């Protein structure tokens, strides 16, 4: 597959492996197409937080298909790609096909459009397993990433 047809983060790169849903967004949260989000205790979409370099996705994983700013909890919704879908993200250096990854984070800062290595699938930042890797321009399939190469992830698959 050539992902420059034209695909960007938040697009359905494998429509046959796609689950889409609409989620309510917490007031004031800016949704950016392609970024990964989670939910709060009330089930509203929020930005993931991090502790010890691990983003907390334990309450759900959602990739935004559109950009929007939530104005009201009761009326603001957006379309998201849901778990068990194949999603396109950026990767850090040294990732390989089949590898389990988590959402990129360092200390308390989350990089919501990028993934990094993780040792186990049970951590709270667990994102899924790498299905394919492409160069930054999307033209060539690869086996190992350099920084910001595109990776297609089976989201939520251990």
Image (cartoon, grey):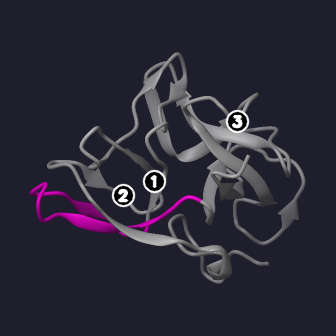
Q: Residue at x 53, y 30 (%)?
A: 105
Residues shaded magenta: 65-83
Q: Residue at x 70, y 66 (%)?
A: 137
155 relative to 110, above or below: below
Q: Residue at x 70, y 43 (%)?
A: 147
With 102 as the anchor, is 26 left or right in this view?
left
27 is within the stretch colored magenta: no
Residue 71: x and y in percent read 10, 57
Q: Main secondary structure of the magenta part?
A: loop
Residue for badge 2:
32
Task: Count residues near mark 3 (Cα–Cα under 10 Å), then give few for <14, some for 14-19, many for 20+.
Answer: some
Asked where in the image residue 67 lies, by quadrant, the reply is: bottom left
Q: Secondary structure at mark 3?
A: loop
Residue 35 - label: 1
Q: How many discs appear?
A: 3
Residue 121 - label: 3
Residue 2 - label: none
Q: Secondary structure at mark 1?
A: loop
- In this view, the mark in front (1 or 3): 3
1 relative to 152, above or below: below
- In this view, the mark in front (3 or 2): 3
């Amino acid at each position: 597959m050539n992902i420059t047809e034209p695909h960007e983060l938040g697009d359905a790169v494998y429509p046959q492996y796609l689950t889409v849903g609409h989620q309510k967004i917490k007031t004031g949260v800016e949704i950016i197409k392609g970024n990964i989000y989670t939910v709060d205790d009330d089930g509203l979409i929020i930005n993931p937080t991090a502790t010890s370099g691990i983003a907390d996705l334990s309450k759900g994983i959602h990739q935004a298909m559109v950009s929007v700013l939530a104005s009201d909890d009761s009326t603001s919704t957006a379309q998201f790609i849901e778990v068990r879908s194949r999603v396109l993200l950026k990767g850090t250096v040294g990732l390989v096909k089949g590898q389990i990854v988590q959402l990129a984070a360092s200390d308390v800062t989350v990089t919501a459009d990028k993934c990094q290595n993780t040792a186990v699938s049970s951590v709270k930042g667990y994102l899924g397993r790498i299905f394919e890797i492409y160069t930054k321009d999307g033209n060539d399939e690869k086996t190992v990433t350099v920084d910001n190469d595109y990776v297609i992830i089976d989201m939520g698959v251990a």
